[in-house]
Image: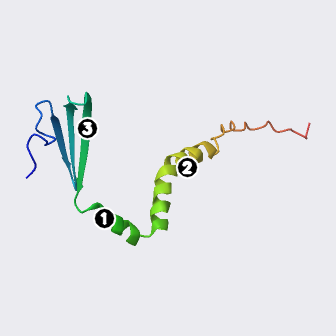
Amino acid sequence: MPDSKNSPYSHIGATKVAARLPGLDIEIIHRRLPEADAERISINLTATPSFEAFGDFLEAANPFTFWLRAMELAWAPWLQAASAVMQPQSAPRPLPSLPRPRRDDSV
């Protein structure tokens, strides 16, 4: 068991913040080091499943498909905006033609 005097949490001025997300625990510890006139910040990440298991999953997946889906998501708003701009504007309809008076050739 480590000596409590050398423990990073033994100082009174230590601040600890923890967050729990699905599959990830985050712990941030901030403390002053009076003997060195400095501060220390520690960030601890704990993943469930492990980071190695997630890496194995990515290796097993088809990277081309992953890249294709990522690019589709990134470009989708721009492609939709471009197609909206490129569509032909609705031209005003011509006025209905008026009937022309008939010429009477018998006169």
Rendered location of residue 98, percent (x, y): 72, 36
Q: Label 3, secondary structure: give it.
A: strand
Could you tell which of marks 1 and 3 lies nearer the N-terminus? 3
- Is 105 situated above or below 71? above
Q: Are marks 2 and 1 in contact (CB under 8 Å)?
A: no
Query: Where, by quadrant of the figure, is residue 101 drawn?
Result: top right
Residue ID for mark 1? 52
Residue ID for mark 3? 41
**Dot 3 alpha-carbon crowd within 10 angstroms: few under 14, some 14 to 19, many 20 or more:** few
Residue ID for mark 2? 79
Q: Nearer the viewer, mark 1 or mark 3?
A: 3
Q: Residue at x 10, y 38 (%)?
A: 10
- Viewer-closest of 105 and 55: 55
Q: Residue at x 46, y 53 (%)?
A: 73
Q: Residue at x 27, y 30 (%)?
A: 38
Residue type at mark 1?
Glu
Could you tell which of marks 2 and 1 lies nearer the N-terminus? 1
Q: Label 1, secondary structure: give it.
A: helix
